[in-house]
Amino acid sequence: MPAITSRRSFLWISAGVAVTLLAACSAPAPTPVPAKPAAPKPAESAKPAEAPKPVEKPAAAAPPKAASGGTLVWDTFRGVGTPWPEDRIKAFEGANAGWKVDFRPITLPGNVQAEAYPKMYAMFASDTLGDVFAFDPSHWEFYRAVPKGLLKPIDDYVKDDKYDVGQFYAPFIEMQKWQGKMWGLPSWGWSGQDGWIYNEVQLLEAGIKPPDHNSPEWTLEAMREHVKKLNKPGSGGTYDRYGGNLALGAAGATVYTRAVNEPDFHDGKKSMITDANVMKAFQWVQDMAQTDKALALPGAFQGSAVDLMASGKLSIVQSGSLVVFNVQKAIKDEKAVVVRAALFPKRKDGKRPSQLRGGTWNIGAKAKNPDVGWKFIQTLSNKEGTLKFNTIGGNGALVRPDIMDDPYFSHPGFRPFLENLLTAMPATVPANGRGTEFEQTINQTWAETYLGKATFSDGMKKLQDAVQKVLDRPAE
């Protein structure tokens, strides 16, 4: 989960975020490892969500209620260019005689998902948006699309069909809810930028014991020391090897802030970036970026962090579980690069710092065949559909516990992430729904500080003011 990287300018989105967020959406599957994985366990002290109930064999989709046949229109940027859409269309049409799916891929010229949404809003306004599509919560547009009336709630379908939402991890079902209703079924999803993914070979060569993320010795300072020790500057400002690469951006900032025992760096209406304790999170990044000069920063290298790590030129990348598979797929010399991972240290309350990431399959409010759309999104999200979304669709779809016994998920570098799928901390949503603007502002403004173009104190004040300005704006 090769990785996709943004080809737009850095001022659109920081390279660290682009690698991580886009990889969550589109990347080829790695070679399976035929080991039998263990069942996931929630964090010891975290308050776990109610354990989901795996469904061994989801029932076949029942025939549509509305009519005996016709055409369902599916507009999507997900899975485009992979065999997954065709597989799901074949499964649906085979179970629903008389119905055909008109698959209309939404292209992303710059490989940036945000480019899809203006097109989709325009299609909705002109009554040309299809029956089924996706406005993802983790890309913020879900929180604009709901109040703008683009989505049809599915609560009645769930109730009438006695649909078992327990077949999904509970946090990903909660993500489908907003303003008192449920608006879709989970598509992709993972627990966020909560992983410290490292090359075990390089740690051992440097005399560093692979981290035990349950040990009290595993702290933010220990993580920084690993990056410093593994960093190998070259001559003339070049690097023989970078110590680490951080996610940065809004999602990264949330994880760092939660790692210093704060809820987030904002509460949806008010920015707390210049709060003394929150500043410790941003200082942690600044220390590695400018004091230690041990990070592969945006603009300092070509390609992606995945490419750097797979080639042995990067020892640690902070990201989500999908990057484990991305790196494994890209490795040329498996003796030189062995991918393993640890989670961020537990907080004082026993929780792991994380930010739940995920997507949704929606039925349009103007759908011509909404009942058929309900059957189709079940086909996309059932056990087979979700597993194949990973294995042939190139996505990180970790939303169901009943797929985790597949050999695809047996990579030892992936296994630590299972803990957080039950307990991942939800994102803090900007109250005015301006999440895209909010994220772009953070990416652009924070970069001035960690790239050394502004002092830390001046940069944080500017970031605080810029973020607050966005949060103060009225809803669209």
Image: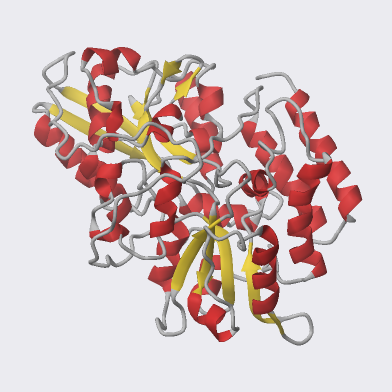
Residue at 55% across, 86% down: 205
Q: What is the x, y in percent for residue 140?
A: 56, 33
Q: Is residue 325 left or right of residue 266?
A: left
Q: Is residue 387 left or right of residue 471?
A: left
Comparing 349 with 403, the one in front is 349
Q: Quadrant of the C terminus?
A: top right
446 lies above or below 327: above
Q: What is the x, y in percent for residue 368?
A: 30, 17
228 lies above or below 342: below
Q: Quadrant of the N terminus?
A: bottom left
Residue at 74% across, 65% down: 288
Count of marks overlaid on the render: 0
Q: Is residue 456 left or right of residue 215?
A: right
262 lies above or below 71: below
Comparing 167 with 126, the one in front is 167
Q: What is the x, y in percent for residue 225?
A: 69, 70
Q: What is the x, y in percent for residue 252?
A: 63, 49
Comparing 39 with 3, the one in front is 39
Q: Is residue 326 visible?
A: yes
Residue at 12% across, 28% down: 96
